[in-house]
Structures are given as C-alpha cells and as structure tokens.
Image: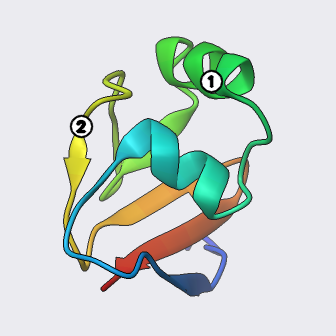
Amino acid sequence: MTNQAPIEDVSIGGEVIRLGQFLKFAGLLDTGGNVKEAVIDGDVTVNGEVDRRRGRQLQPGDVVGFEGRRVRVCP
C-alpha cells in the first residue's frame, strides 16, 4: 500500500491555467527555469501521469504532483 500525500486545493481564480504557471502559482517551484527543468525531466505528474508539456491546459479538478506534494486545481 502506498502512502500518498494529502491533496492540497489551490484556487486559480478562473477556469484554466497552464501547467508551468500553476507550478509557480501553487508554490511547488520558484522560477520558470526550475519549472522547465522539472517538467522536461519528467518530475511532474498530472492526474498521476508524467506530463512534459509546460503549456498543458489544466482544468479544475486536475491534480498536479511534484516531489511528494499533490495539488488540485480549483476555480
């Protein structure tokens, strides 16, 4: 059995946000350079699957994972 981190909810104040923007907005990463590196290296998941597209459009309900943290996109 896997112990997963609890999911944190982060309101984006809208309906869509790009993955790269959300990683910074949610405080998972500090800079665009760090975001680019983490995404390209496959360290970021969306809904449990690795996604290497910084420009991916996230919708409310999507769950982004990075370094043991899980954050859900909320409107």
Q: 38 or 31: nearer the eye?
A: 31
Report the disc number at residue 53: none
Image location of residue 5, percent across then percent down: 66, 76
Q: Nearer the viewer, mark 2 or mark 1?
A: 2
Answer few, some or many: residues within 10 Å of disc 1's Cα (few below 14, many 20 plus, some between 14 and 19).
some
Q: Which quarter of the picture shows residue 64?
A: bottom left
The number of callouts visible is 2
Report the disc number at residue 56: 2
Residue that numbered label 1 is attached to = 38
Query: Which residue lies at the image location 31% right of the left edge and 24% below the top edge?
Result: 53
Return the residue found at the far front: 13
In this rendering, the answer to whether 31 lies above or below 68 is above
Return the residue found at the far right: 30
Image location of residue 13, percent across then percent down: 38, 82
- Judge left or right: residue 57 versus residue 38: left
Q: 15 or 54: nearer the eye?
A: 15
The kind of residue tagged 2 is: Arg
In this rendering, the answer to whether 58 lies above or below 15 is above
